[in-house]
Amino acid sequence: PGRRPREVRARDLVKSLLAELLAAAAAMPGVAIASPFRPDVLRGKRCLVTGGTSGIGFEIARQLGLHGATITVMGRREQVAASASAALRAEGIDARHSVGDVRKGDAVAAAVAAAVGPSGRLDVLVNCAAGNFLVPAEALSSNGFRTVMDIDAGGVFNMSRAAFDALKRDGWSESASARTDSALIINISATLQYGATWYQTHASAAKAAIDSVTRSLGLEWGHYGIRVAGIAPGPIRDTAGITKLAPGAEGMEDLIASTVPILRMGEKSDIALTCVWLASSAGTFVTGETVVVDGGAWLFKPPIAPREMIVQMSRGVEKQSRKVGTAVSKL
Ligand code: HXC
């Protein structure tokens, strides 16, 4: 009541288009992604994954390990860290853990020391540790804002800076023949900060800062044989990003998937296998860039009308405009 009939029609159209997308997403089978890479593609590489004791970080550690790398996972909770490294070892991966907080200098140094082993060398650092919660900006305290900035953006810088000596490749800038095997930092970002996201002022600022650090270190550290890349995951099934930040979303995966252009939610392995690609020789010309791995989710807009209607209408509009001979917009 009170709405103009045209508005009602437009709303009904949008509703039916969304229902169509939802049905299409529901009809999509689950996706199990098998690695296309050789199992020894990362053999000999030493990798440190912060936040690698659970969630996406754990799957990243697992996939790097399953492709031959030696793994150290870092996390704050002793028991969770111990069982994560045990689970990796149970799959035949050479794995250990380091307990600590990426905000604390001694913990950061200890994690790097554990990861490099006697060689003193580190090949891949994955900065995946993050903290987040939903909060309207007017209810967010300065300390809440600072805490997430410190964990996310501060953590990325702290870890990268502490690992610099172990990552840098001697002679890289002096001799072309030394430029064969670069080291890599991967910073796990997000798409929240592209535009704006409700109740995520702190995390959006932190992820934007991470993307900036990725570009700055990419620019400055290529000289030392260190590549720096980011990955921005979209909605990934069975992660804190969904359980903690999209309350009520569990069990509504089809609904979420219907807002992803490729009509499925992401799997943790989508992100982990992107790490394998970046760490392999196929990724060696990538630096300073953040790869969005979200099935196109952040681009999502509902269609303005069904495809068939557009195809028919567009021809009609075209014909009409030629008849009238007008040069103004055809829409
Ligand atoms: C408002 C909150 C709050 C909440 C904490 N704070 N939770 N404010 N609403 N729900 C405030 C506190 O009141 C305090 O401010 C400040 O934040 C610091 O809180 P602490 O609990 O002291 O901090 P700490 O123990 O360091 O814990 C950090 C944390 C916690 C971020 C708050 O949730 C955490 O450790 N999380 C790690 C795991 C996690 O969140 N993973 C999710 C990652 S998902 P005052 O002013 O009171 O002192 C992710 C995905 C991003 O990152 C992309 C999604 C698409």
Image (cartoon, helix red, strand yellow):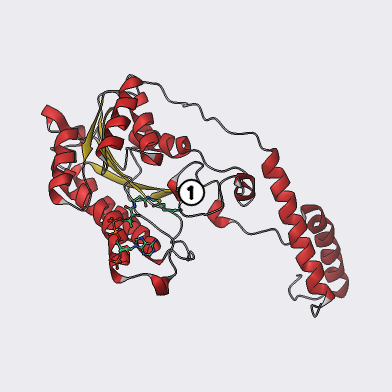
Horizontally, residue 86 falls left or right of residue 197, namely left
Q: Nearer the viewer, residue 15 or 299?
A: 15
* 291 shown above or below 322: above
Query: From this viewpoint, which residue is outermost toward the front?
Result: 79
Residue, disc 1: 243
- The percent coordinates of residue 311 (x first, y second) are 80, 55
- The percent coordinates of residue 227 (x first, y second) are 28, 44
For the C terminus, the quadrant is: bottom right
Q: Residues within 10 Å of mark 1 (few under 14, many from 20)?
A: few
- The percent coordinates of residue 83 (x first, y second) are 31, 30
Q: What element carries label 1?
A: helix
Q: Nearer the viewer, residue 96 or 278?
A: 96
Give the quarter the ligand 1 occupies: bottom left
Task: Specify whether residue 280 is in view.
Answer: no
Q: Nearer the viewer, residue 190 or 75?
A: 75
Q: Quadrant of residue 323?
A: bottom right
Q: Which residue is drawn at 18% across and 43% down?
A: 163
Q: Which of 69 and 182 is in front in this view?
A: 69
Task: Specify whether residue 120 is in view.
Answer: yes
